[in-house]
Image (spheres, grey):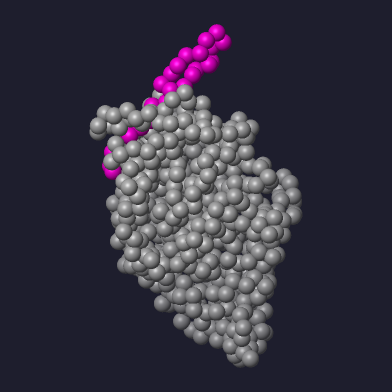
Amino acid sequence: MEIDILKRKIGLSFAENGNAEIWLWAPFALSISVLIKASGLKLIMHNEDFGYWFIQTEEIKLEDEYEFEICSADATESDSSKIKYLRQADPASIYQKDGVSGLSTAVNLDAFHWTDQNWKGLLAEDFIIYELHTATFTFNGDFESIESKLDYLVDLGITAIEIMPISQFPGNRNWGYDGVYPFAAQNTYGGPKALQHLVNACHEKGIAVILDVVYNHMGPEGNFLNDFGPYFTNKYQTPWGKAINFDDAYSDPVRDFFIENILMWFRDFHIDALRLDAVHAIKDFSVLHILEEARSYVNRLSAIMGRIYYLHVELDLNDNKYINPHSEKGYGMDAQWLDEFHHALRVAAGQEKIGYYSDFNGIDHLAKSYQDAYVYDGQYSEHRKKKFGIKADENQGKQFIVFSQNHDQVGNRMLGERTSKLVSFEMLKLMAAAVFCSPFLPLIFMGEEYGETNPFQFFTSHSGKDLIEAVKKGRRDEFAAFHNSADVPDPQSEATFNGSKLNWDLLNVGKHQKLLSYYKALINLRKTVPALANLNRNQLEVKAFANQNSLILKRWHNNQQIMCLMNFSAKEQVLPFKIASNYKIIFNSTAQKWGGKQTEEILLSSTTIPIYPESILIFKSEHV
């Protein structure tokens, strides 16, 4: 079946004449029927080429609930074959009103009235990203409630929200990485119509929307894909079990299934960018990698729609093949999360060197990440026990996304402590500035901007006792290298989930209020100072002072220069900075207005400059 760029063919959709059309891939089925709950009708589907089944009918109406009856031969017995019947929801369901175990609901995505016709998307370098989890971002925890915070985000200076996965998962409490219906927007968040409404509202406010999607595995509960066909392969194993079948026998329809999903988010939901989870766990040794093939389809859709669509990846490989263009034999992804910047920053800020942090020495590696993006670009990694990485000298700054914390780095701690509970108030400000002064795309995690103190812990709402116990054990094993004592919070407990919600009452309280003002000023500085806003990695110099746990970062653009002096130590340091008369200080993290103690003028000499503990000074010069 050929993919239609402008129309979703997999699953149920409505034609212009109002008839429902359904395409289903089930290559081993003897027959397929559609069962409609309201009318009780049983509609026979027609067998098409390559294992697809199709029907066009006027018997299915909007909001009808339906499922498939699959007739197949059970050839497990050597002497005979038995006919068996299964009933399952649509694997490409758009809406699971009653969750993963319920029927599918017929939805027409084309019926939504969009008002974002003038929205063409953001330039990549203009992304200021705010990562959020729908259910814990607000008290009500749904798409509609996110809309109530958009003015707040605009005032903060955010240009893009990144929503953690929303594809239908079991229950109502989950990070989203256990999704089993890739096309269905989570019912407890409001479903597909509410998501369309949210995206439309974001665009009206000038905010782009990034959606986190998972194409490396499916969740364990409610995952019935194998009842339809070989969606998974025994050739490879992932941390979550069998790999999705991207290169084994019968893989073409599986690849099309996920490409259709990518196109749907862009075309039918007006999403601006997708963040593809852990693409290093996608097993594909085809001549044309699934990511590269998806990129080609997205490019065609972008040309037709006149909008910019981005593909960001989480990647535990320092391999720029993923973000290099097709012309350079790359997969063409637009940007990757740069975890190594985070790790080096955390060690510089005092993070204990255990687990994967053991590979990082702090300030020297932070300086290297500023300069080279990848810290490990061919050196031996003690943690990995091998040489690791490749140089990324030719990749642009806008191809890397950096952060001082994110959902993983908070939630992977046993107690889910945010950075606000781990470092001083002054260090919080310094770490934020270290991100926004980088030549990369900045991302902040919800609540970071005001120093949220509630944890963000791992939570689930599975239904099976064995699965619940397995998740608990897996959680303990996952970060065994980080903690040696105490009990892991129960992921299944509703208290774990409720305790992870943001406390918006902190906004106007003491240092939280000052930190929020600090973030607003920092983001505004990033946007309005050309030497910071321009992401040319060649216009950068950095020098680390390991004995002082400090560094000096110099960036420039045209006639403007910026000097960022960062002191990660607990003592005042004097750095060898030859200050010229045309340099003016434009940002001081220890100023009283940001909750600091510095009131006196900074004593400048011709060759050195003092800098308070755990602070940053930013100087600017305009020269001919």
Q: Is residue 250 above or below residue 161?
A: above
Please name whichever residue, 454 or 449, is drawn nearer the observer in this view of the structure: 449
Residue displayed at 41% across by 53% down: 268
Please name whichever residue, 13 or 150, is drawn nearer the observer in this view of the structure: 13
Left or right of 420, for residue 244: right
Q: Is residue 493 above or below residue 297?
A: above
Tell which residue pokes out farthest to the front in this image.
17
Left or right of 170, for residue 548: right
Tally of numbered tags: 0
Q: Is residue 529 magenta?
A: no
Q: Is residue 71 above or below residue 411?
A: above
Residue 487 place in picture, x, y as percent: 46, 38
Residue 524 place in picture, x, y as percent: 46, 75
Part of the protein shown in magenta: 62-85
Residue displayed at 29% across by 36% down: 59
Quarter the C terminus occupies: bottom right
Residue displayed at 40% across by 69% down: 118
Q: Is residue 63 magenta?
A: yes
Residue 396 place in picture, x, y as percent: 63, 66
